[in-house]
């Protein structure tokens, strides 16, 4: 049965890509921040994130995204937030989630592509910092994905140790999707990211998905090992509770032994990632500003501008 389902994976994924890839990966503007909780670790009202300790399991911190797209400022704040959590030795785990209606994270804020090579290099360097602080963390981490996790959204999920993705929210016709769809906008998937995708799925899955920018539903993503499905959850609250309980249970293992073992598991990839910084920055800046990519990006930007205009 599994072999049969995997054989059918790519045709259905390609059909989804034609409808969703460009507008969902690159958002023109971020959604307004919402008022945040006044609990421990609470952020200022203008923040892109809020963080608080779970009441039942105070050794688990919940980090909630309030914006659909990552700007340069958002990326810098994400690094600061994660480092602040790391400093609290009473914390063993982090749940990464979003409070947006149908989006976990839609990717890179569109304006970051339009400010020149120097700015984008600085921006991408900060995105790498976000990934590194998450992937190399001493903390147990898991993402609770209730909505679309495309491009950078998928990267954030992959930086976590576990990824739980709801099949479909109650009352919605379609469930969330996940994928690295950079190719759809003319940008190659970076070498380190392609390698990570292979480590978490398989080389064959990477060969099928990445070159076509495949966007997968929960079942398809679970079949290749990209996420862990949560069939019994119907809403965000149930999903969050499920993942918090998972993290609390995982965090019962001896602290030092668990931390050092995770270093051994992730250390080799992390070292390769760090060594790739200059090569990666040069490559991504080059391809983002190639004529092909810029034409696709400008067309997508124009489409988003037209969509945002009020109807006559």
Image (tube, rainbow, N blue to C red):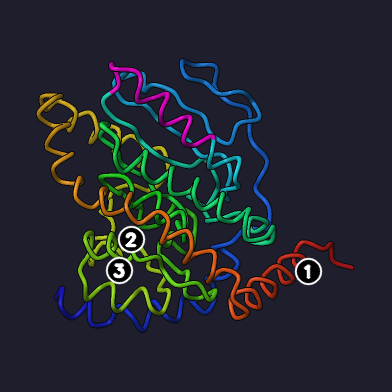
What residue would you read off at disc 2?
192
Q: Nearer the viewer, mark 1 or mark 3?
A: 1
Q: For the residues marked 1 and 3, what is the alpha-carbon distance in whole angstroms?
A: 33 Å
On screen, residue 256 versus residue 177, left or right, reads left
Closer-to-camera residue (250/190) = 190
Q: Nearer the viewer, mark 2 or mark 3?
A: 2
Reply above or below: 239 against 215.
above
Instruction: Tell me if residue 135 is in the magenta stretch.
Output: no
Under circle 2, the secondary element is helix
Placement of the N terminus among the 4 image quadrants: bottom left
Among the 4 quarters of the image, the one containing residue 301: bottom right
Horizontal and vertical percent for residue 272? Answer: 26, 54
Callout 1 secondary element: helix
Vertical placement of 225 versus 5: above or below? above
For the magenta stretch, what is the residue range? 77-91
Circle on res. 306: 1
């Amino acid at each position: 049965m599994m072999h049969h389902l995997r054989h059918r994976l790519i045709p259905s994924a390609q059909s989804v890509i034609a409808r969703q890839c460009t507008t969902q990966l690159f958002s023109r503007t971020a959604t307004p921040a919402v008022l945040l909780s006044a609990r421990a670790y609470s952020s200022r009202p203008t923040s892109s994130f809020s963080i608080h300790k779970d009441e039942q399991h105070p050794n688990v911190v919940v980090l909630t995204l309030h914006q659909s797209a990552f700007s340069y400022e958002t990326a810098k704040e994400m690094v600061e937030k994660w480092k602040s959590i790391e400093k609290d030795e009473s914390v063993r785990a982090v749940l990464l989630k979003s409070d947006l209606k149908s989006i976990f994270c839609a990717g890179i804020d569109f304006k970051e592509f339009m400010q020149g090579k120097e700015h984008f290099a600085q921006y991408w360097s900060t995105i790498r910092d976000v990934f590194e602080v998450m992937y190399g963390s001493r903390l147990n981490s898991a993402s609770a994905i209730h909505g679309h996790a495309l491009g950078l959204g998928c990267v954030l999920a992959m930086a976590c140790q576990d990824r739980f993705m709801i099949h479909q929210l109650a009352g919605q016709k379609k469930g969330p999707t996940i994928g690295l769809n950079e190719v759809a906008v003319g940008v190659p998937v970076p070498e380190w990211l392609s390698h990570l995708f292979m480590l978490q799925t398989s080389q064959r899955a990477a060969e099928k998905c990445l070159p076509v920018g495949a966007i997968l539903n929960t079942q398809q993503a679970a079949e290749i090992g990209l996420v862990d499905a949560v069939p019994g959850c119907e809403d965000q609250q149930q999903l969050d509770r499920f993942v918090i309980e998972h993290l609390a249970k995982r965090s019962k293992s001896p602290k030092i032994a668990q931390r050092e073992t995770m270093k051994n598991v992730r250390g080799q990839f992390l070292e390769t990632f760090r060594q790739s910084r200059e090569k990666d920055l040069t490559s991504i800046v080059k391809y983002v500003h190639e004529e092909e990519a810029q034409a696709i990006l400008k067309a997508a930007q124009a489409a988003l501008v037209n969509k945002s205009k009020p109807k006559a």
